[in-house]
Amino acid sequence: MNKKNIIYFILGILIGAGLTYYGFISYESLGNEVNKVKTEEEYEEAQNYVNISEKTMEEFGIKIKTAGPDKIVLHKDLTGEIIPNPYSVAHIVPRFKGVVIDIYKEIGDRVKKGEKIATIESNESLVRYDVTSSINGTIIAMHMTPGELIGDEKHIVTVANLNSVWAELNIYQQDLSEIKIGQKAEIFSPTHEVYTGKLFYISPVIDEATRTAVTRVKVQNRNGIWKPGMFVTAKVYTSAKIVNVAVPKDAVQNLNGEKVIFVKTEKGFTPRVVSLGIENGKNVEVLSGLHAGDIYVAKGAFIFKSELLKESFGGEEE
């Protein structure tokens, strides 16, 4: 074998050895990558399930329910104020011009029909006469003082029976088609009292300044909670629909940009992506992702979400 052939032979051995080594390294790397992918898939699958003991669920008030049909009642949110019932308000005007001799009542006092409020001496006859209440009620305005000369409608006494008042609510134009006389309404005070009544009036015209109509609810007020001028909010219930599956709104969680509900499986509770339909303040319709008969987390789902996120970052409770 000449010198040239020997060189080619050595080069061939070196190239072959290099290719063999590269192939071995590539195969080993591929094997490691396959094993890595498999491990990550198994890890991800394992993290999709959350198991919480019954004792812990009881401690945190977690509620489990079976999915099924329900009625969702829709409503409109309105605002307004309490006003006196105008049919129970008396504007008492002194009959003759004269001088106020005595006043026996103050604003806020309760009076009975026929009860004396003030005494006035007539300018013409110098005869004294009494100003009396024409209804049972509360004095809400009085424009006279002792010694004052009175003689026009500015000097009147206003008495209102506040045992029954009205909640006057504003309706935006776009909501008018859905609000009808006779619908149920819940009135809420700033101090969280609630009164349930029905709409008995809707104004036939729109206020030009506010572009709203007015609806009214009669409110029983024997305890005096509902005071004229008080700001109130209201829910007017406009319609109801029976849906195949409905859940409490708290059951729905946001996870990775999607709406999910935690559903019970053999391995534990897993987040299932859902699509939603109509809703009210409490419940929401589930169009897909949750089926009648599925067992799901109705209350406390955020705890399952927290556990899932904690595990996905490799967290373990000590």
Image: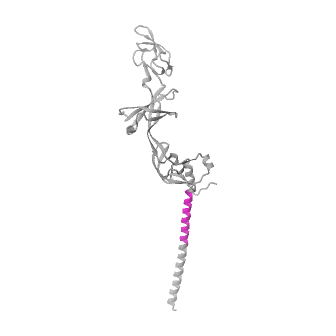
Give how far across and how far down residue 306 sits, in percent. 56, 51
In percent of width and height, residue 258 lies at 48, 53
> Seen from this angle, which residue lies furthest bottom?
1
Q: Residue at x 38, y 35 (%)?
A: 212
Q: Position of residue 240 (x, y in %)?
A: 44, 41
Q: Nearer the viewer, residue 165 or 268?
A: 268
- Of residues 265 and 302, the one nearer the viewer is 265
For residue 167, which quarter of the picture?
top left
**Image position, residue 281 (x, y; %):** 48, 42
Q: Is residue 204 left or right of residue 229?
A: left
Within the magenta stretch, is there residue 193?
no
| Image side of residue 241 versus residue 58, left or right | left
Which residue range is magenta in the image? 28-48
**Residue at 56% of width from left, 67% of height from top?**
35
For the C terminus, the image quarter is bottom right
Name the image quarter holding residue 96: top left
Predominant SS along the magenta part: helix
Q: Is residue 50 left or right of residue 209?
A: right
| Residue 273 drawn above or below residue 119 | below
Residue 46 magenta-highlighted: yes
